[in-house]
Structure formats: structure tokens, C-alpha cells
Image (tube, rainbow, N blue to C red):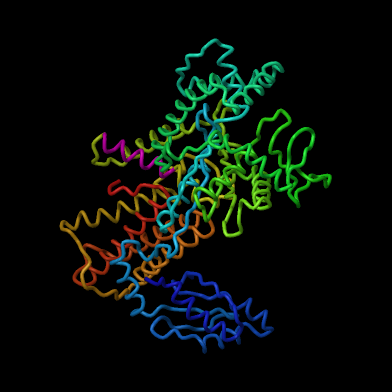
Amino acid sequence: MTSTYDTLLARLQLAFDVLESGADPVLRTSERSDYQANGVMSLAKRLGRPPREVAEEIMGHADLDGVATVEVAGPGFLNLTLIPAFLERQLAALLGDARLGIATAPEPKTVVIDYSAPNVAKEMHVGNLRSTVIGDALARSYRFAGHHVVARNHVGDWGTPFAMLIEHLLDLGDDDVSLSIGDLDAFYKEARVKFDSDDTFKERSRGRVVALQSGDAETLRLWRIIVDQSISYLDQVYQDLGVSLEIADVVGESYYNDMLENVVADLDAAGLLVESGGALCVFPPGFTNRDGEALPLIVQKSDEGFGYAASDLAAVRDRVDNLHADELLYVVGVPQAQHFEMVFAVARLAGWLPDRVRCEHVTFGNVLGTDRKMFKSRSGETVKLASLLGEAIERADEALKERNTDLDEPARMDLAVQIARAAIKYADLSTDRQHDYVFDLERMIAFEGDTGPYLQYAHARLRSIFRRLGETWAPSSLTFALEVDQERHLALGLLAFPEAFEAALAHLQPHRLCVYLFDLAQRLTAFYDACPVLSSEGALREQRLALCDLAARTLSVGLSVLGIDAPEKM
């Protein structure tokens, strides 16, 4: 179905074009549940005419018959009010549409999304949270839109950090590695201390990097055992968090090792490589340090080992040439911004990243504690994701006990897990990803306010209406009179779902969908207070049941796109 927004925009666009070709009005939902076009002001400025005069002329040209009435307000706003017949047709179309007005992509793309990317042999911690949660929401959104998504979990399973871990294991005389992830985490910390304090150990570790990259059999044997243990652990964490990443999505730095020599050779053949301090580098135009000196992207180090840039360049080639990507998204923290800008620039210089491929670094801010400093445990250590989720589940279970639910213990615990996931994910996703946010579990787990559990409860409350109905309800031939303001307000909110989804996807900003869902839940609260459902009768009850059904389905689909469960009961 054509969305309400698209219908209005298309008709207003024709009126704008009468005055100036290419004018682009922007519609937004106003507090009066009508539509305003706020592109009038900028158009009037370009034409050098009074905004109200321009608005009146647009109103005269706009063909809104059968869609809306329009009036000029204030300095030049166009206030549009949807007519009942059009509103009724749009709602009726939604009732029979499993996708609630969201069209599938007419030309599906292959979208490679690089996200999560923790380090092997280390426990996942809060620093891995945002990439994992935001990346998963984007992957789900692209899939729902009809695109082919290839998830790439580019884990750190190669290079110096891994080499120093192997060296430390060999120092301890343990070549029969059967370690838990907790053991590996402790070993990693010990190895890091040695690497930072022992120059001999540091040189041996760097030599082990070369052995690893050159395929030394013993080095690879130890590496494989540790990697397999780590990947198994990561898979369990993703399952516990309800993240869609699978073992098959793990394509770490090691995967690209056999491609690195070709990366160097082809850059050299293209005349892009420059030797600098014994290393082989590319100096992409436009990148300089504080002194104005050209910045190098180091492809091969002076010890003949390969750096992160070589792996990332190989990944670009693989994703474009072999996966046939139309879009490349890298959900990685903002500190890596310059690195990725340089990698993308070099890939384009080399012809490996054609203009047809969208390539974007999807940045995000930090997770802060309630003291507004980097989120740490009381002992000052980075908080592990497993313990974070465990605490959230405990708090959710306590909250459910206080609510005296009629669920048995297994069902209650299952619901507590769903609530805990929702609390953690929604707190992250509801914040503009480019901003920092405060991790306050007490606030996040609340059933009131702008939280994941609040939206889950809104959905469960709607479903309870149909359980109390005592019979299967299916939409029949009905009319949407919408005589009460709260009914109309809710109806307009339901029709805005496609626009909210499309905006969140187009801008790679899941928080836009979160803002919409929270607004819808607030409209529902106003609707409940003013509009009895089950105690109403006849056509009025059918209309209100239809609005409840649409709202429940919208919340369910919207939450699922974010990776959040929508429980039937709470």
C-alpha cells in the first residue's frame, strides 16, 4: 500500500513544483494529529516572497481532494487534516497487510554488515555491547525490508595480541590447551603484562606473528584450539542476548591472511605503495597530521608482518568481488573513524571499491556509568556482558515477583530473560547512536517511562484484551468513525509506522524507530483512558478492537526489528 506520508508528499510536491522545480517539502506529524509542510519557509526565502503568500499559492495548486483539507496557519505553515474516508481506507488496508504498510524493496541489495567484532580469547564486555546491538538491529531491519544481508563478525583472532597469548602458553609449558574462556581471559591479562614489561617477550611475540601469518604448523595448532573455544563461547553469549549472529558469521582477521600478499602486490602494481621507515605504505590524498605532514596507511610493517589495514583492504575486496555487495556497513566505534576513512580512500584509489557501492562507517558513542564516566565495575574493571545480563535477569525476575504474576517459575524465568534483553537493548538503541548514554539498570528495567519493558507491557496489555474477549477475533467489514480524539490520534500514529521504519533504515539510526514506538505506546495510554474497548458495543467495539489489533501487531513487528521480544503476557 502507498503510505499516508507518500500520498501527501506526492500531491504537495506537484504544488511546490509549480513554484520552483525541485522543491522538497518535509512533512511531520503535528501535536494536533494533522500534517504540516514546513518546506514553505525555505521555498519562500529562495523565491524572495512572503511565506504566507507562498503557502496560499501552494494551497491553491495542491490537489488534495479525497485525501485532506488544508489551511494556512501562522507565518506560512500548511496544516493538513486527513478526511475520514481517506483515513478509513488507509486503516482498512493495514488490517489486511501483514507488513503493516512497509513495502519490500523493489530491487533488493546485498548488504554486508560488519559488527560486534570482539577479540578472541577475551570475554565479551560492555565495550562490545553497542556494536553488537546496533549492528544486529540494522541487520534485522535490512532483512525485513527485503534485502540480502551478509553478517560479518570480524573478530580479532590474529596478529600481535594472539601471538603473545600463544607465547605465554608455551612459556608455561602447556601445549595441551583445554582452557575455559575465563582461563583464557586471565592468560591474556598475564600475557599483556609480560608484553609491556619484557622486551625479550615482546620480540618473541612479534616473531610469533610472522610464524602465524606464514602458516607455521605448531603455531596454527595452538591457534586453532584457542579460536574454537573462543568462538563457542561467543556463540553462547549471542544466544543469551538474543542476537542473530551465528558461528558461520564469524569471519575474522585470519580469514584474509592468504589474501594479504596480493593486496600488497596489487597496490604496488598500481603505483600506490611507498616505502617509509622500512614499511610499505599508501599515502591517500587529504590525510595529514597536526604538522600538515601526509599520513601513511601502513599495509606491511618493517618486520614483513601485515597490519590491520591490510586485512581491512582484503575484506573490502572480498566483500565487493566475491559477496557482490551493494552496501558495506561497518558498525565500529568512532575512535576508528580516521582508520576507516583511509582504508576506504585507498580501496577507491585502487579501484576495489567502485562508486556504485555504498560504504559507510556506522559510528557510535560510549556507554557511561551513572557517574557519567566510562562504565566500569566497582573494582574498576570493564563489565562483562554475561554478568551484566545476569544481573538484569535477576532484577527483572524480582520485578515480576512483586507484580504477583500468575506464571509458574519456568515461564516467569523465561519472561525475565526477555525483559532483561529488552531493557539492555532498548536503552542502547533508543539513544542516538552517535551520542553517549548512561547505563542505569534500575531505570532501564522499569515498566514505566521510555524503556524496553514499558513497550513490552504495552504489547502484552493489548493481547490481554483479546484473551478476555473469550473468542477468536478476526477483522470483518467495519468502519472507522474515529469520533473520539484519542481514537484518531492513535490511528494517525499507526499510519506513521512505515515512515518511521524507512527513516530509521535510510539514516542507519534505530533510535528513530524507538522514538516512534514509545510515542505509539503513549497514544495507547491516552486511548485506554478515554475509550473503553470490551464494554463498548456493536460497530464501536469492532472499531476499537481493530485499533488494538493494529497497535499490538505494530509493536510486535517494531520490537522484533530491533531484536526485542514482544511477550503475550506480563
Q: Residue at x 79, y 37 (%)?
A: 276
Quarter of the image for the N terminus: give it: bottom left
Q: Is residue 74 above or below residue 112?
A: below
Q: Nearer the viewer, residue 67 or 518?
A: 67
Q: Residue furthest right?
A: 291
Farthest left residue?
Answer: 471
* Percent coordinates x, y for residue 210 in the rendering: 64, 26
Q: Which stretch is magenta? A: 410-423
Q: Residue 295's image quarter? A: top right
Where is residue 285 shown, x and y percent of the image? 75, 51
Question: Residue at (52%, 86%) from the top-left corner?
Answer: 59
Q: Position of residue 190 (x, y in %)?
A: 59, 18
Residue 416 part of the magenta-drawn span: yes
Magenta segment includes 121: no
Q: Is residue 65 above or below residue 345?
A: below
Residue 305 vs 272, above or below: the answer is above
Magenta: main secondary structure equals helix
